[in-house]
Image (spheres, helix red, strand yellow):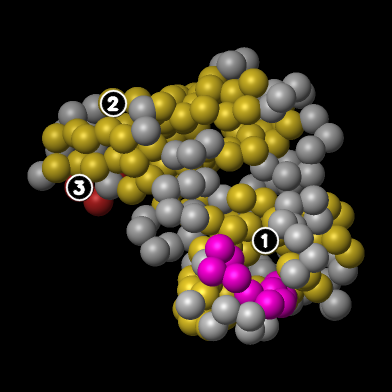
Amino acid sequence: GAGVSQTPSNKVTEKGKYVELRCDPISGHTALYWYRQSLGQGPEFLIYFQGTGAADDSGLPNDRFFAVRPEGSVSTLKIQRTERGDSAVYLCASSLSGPQETQYFGPGTRLLVL
Amino acid sequence: EDQVTQSPEALRLQEGESSSLNCSYTVSGLRGLFWYRQDPGKGPEFLFTLYSAGEEKEKERLKATLTKKESFLHITAPKPEDSATYLCAVNAGNNRKLIWGLGTSLAVNP
């Protein structure tokens, strides 16, 4: 694919609901990253995958957040029992092999929890 | 503690008025410094990667430079379409994550 794609582009949900956000990285990129961005802030790191495994999940705020990448390509970020404070733009990025290399970002998913 | 600071927070220029954005960092063992541009409602768009002090990279009206303590993004004769937030991020040491600045919001008036 030409770039990183994310679906949906927008998601509105109610407090307490479960949501899944999808990321399709650049073909051949083994490293994949999830970030969260609030207005006026830089991206906040959530989790980094190397292949199928989570190499660093230290940014996940609590156990309501979980991410998978079962085949080393597409990744899904899952948020259980959503809270209003989860409202943000969720960004996905990929790089060829690791964080010392350039990360290319998708357009983001705008999540609004009512 | 590893830290990245960008200045100014906001900058307003007239079209054609050249200026520079600053990204200062305090990290151990720089492995890469990255500049991105972000337009409202979009993901960050990659501009430059710099790996060692003295390195410079250029693209159209933008030029990025790197020293041991900071990086500058020079904008020469900017146009209104250069209006965006410019983000700086650093990968250092054994960190598996990027450390991000808060960005500089640039507005170029016609």
Q: CA distance from mark 3 to mark 1?
A: 31 Å
- Left-right relation of B81 to A65: left
| Kind of residue sitting beneath label 2 | Ser
What residue is pinned by disc 3? B80
Bin the neighbour count of mark 3 within 10 Å (Cα to Cα): few under 14, some 14-19, many 20 and up. Answer: some
Horizontally, is A46 left or right of B13 in the view?
Answer: right
Question: Quick check: B70 above or below A77?
Answer: above
Given residues B56 and B42, the one toward you in this image is B42
Number of numbered discs on residues = 3
> Which residue is located at x 20 percent, y 41 percent?
B108
> Three-letter amino acid code at disc 3?
Pro
- In front here: A89 or A106? A89
Q: Which residues are magenta?
A: A77-86
Tell me the residue that label 1 is attached to.
Answer: A34
Residue at the image position 34 percent from the left and 41 percent from the top: B105
Please state the chain letter of the residue tagged with numbered disc 2 in the rendered image.
B
Quarter residue B62 falls in: top left
Residue B40: give x, y in percent of width and height: 36, 58
Q: Compared with residue A67, is residue B40 higher up or lower down, i.e. above or below? A: above
Indicate which disc residue B19 carries: 2
Q: Residues under labels 1 and 2: Cα distance?
A: 33 Å
Which residue is pictured at 31% across the width and 35% down the height? B10
Q: Residue furthest right?
A: A53
